[in-house]
Structure formats: structure tokens, C-alpha cells
């Protein structure tokens, strides 16, 4: 999924107050991942 599709799936499943955090690794390789914070 892309981020927006995944966010829409969360909303469809009743989650709200979604905040997306992009976390980069500490080695300068440019790798990152996303953490979705939300409320039930």
C-alpha cells in the first residue's frame, strides 16, 4: 500500500486521530520507515 491507501484502510476500520511519523535510521543510509499512531 502507499501511505494514503493504508491511512484510508485504518480510517475505514474505525481508527481516528492518525499521525504518521517518518523514522530514519541512524546510519545516514537514507532508509526510513513510517509509524502510524492512532486512537481507537
Image (tube, rainbow, N blue to C red):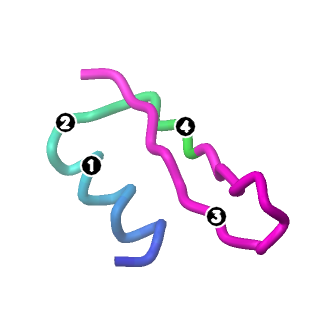
Q: Secondary structure at mark 2?
A: loop
> Disc 2 or 4, which lies upstream in sequence?
2
Mark 3 or mark 2: whose residue is earlier in sequence:
2
* Residue at the disc numbered 4: 19
Label 1 and label 4: CA atoms lie apart by: 11 Å
* Residue 22 screen position, x and y as percent: 65, 52
Which of the 4 image quadrants contains residue 5?
Answer: bottom left
Upstream in sequence: badge 1 or badge 4: 1
Q: Position of residue 20 (x, y in %)?
A: 56, 45
Distance from Cα at disc 3 to Cα at disc 2: 27 Å
Mark in front: 2 vs 4: 4
25 horizontally vs 13: left or right = right
Mark number for residue 10? 1
Q: Residue at x 79, y 61 (%)?
A: 27
**Residue name at image x 84 percent, y 66 percent:** 28
* 3D distance between C-alphas at marks 3 and 1: 21 Å
* Residue tagged 2: 14
Q: Is residue 23 above or below residue 5?
A: above
Of residues 21 and 33, the one nearer the viewer is 33
Task: Give the extent of the magenta segment.
Answer: 21-40
Amino acid at each position: 500500500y502507499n501511505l494514503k491507501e493504508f491511512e484510508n484502510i485504518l480510517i475505514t476500520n474505525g481508527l481516528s486521530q492518525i499521525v504518521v511519523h517518518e523514522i530514519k535510521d541512524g546510519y545516514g543510509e537514507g532508509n526510513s520507515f513510517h509509524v502510524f499512531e492512532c486512537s481507537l
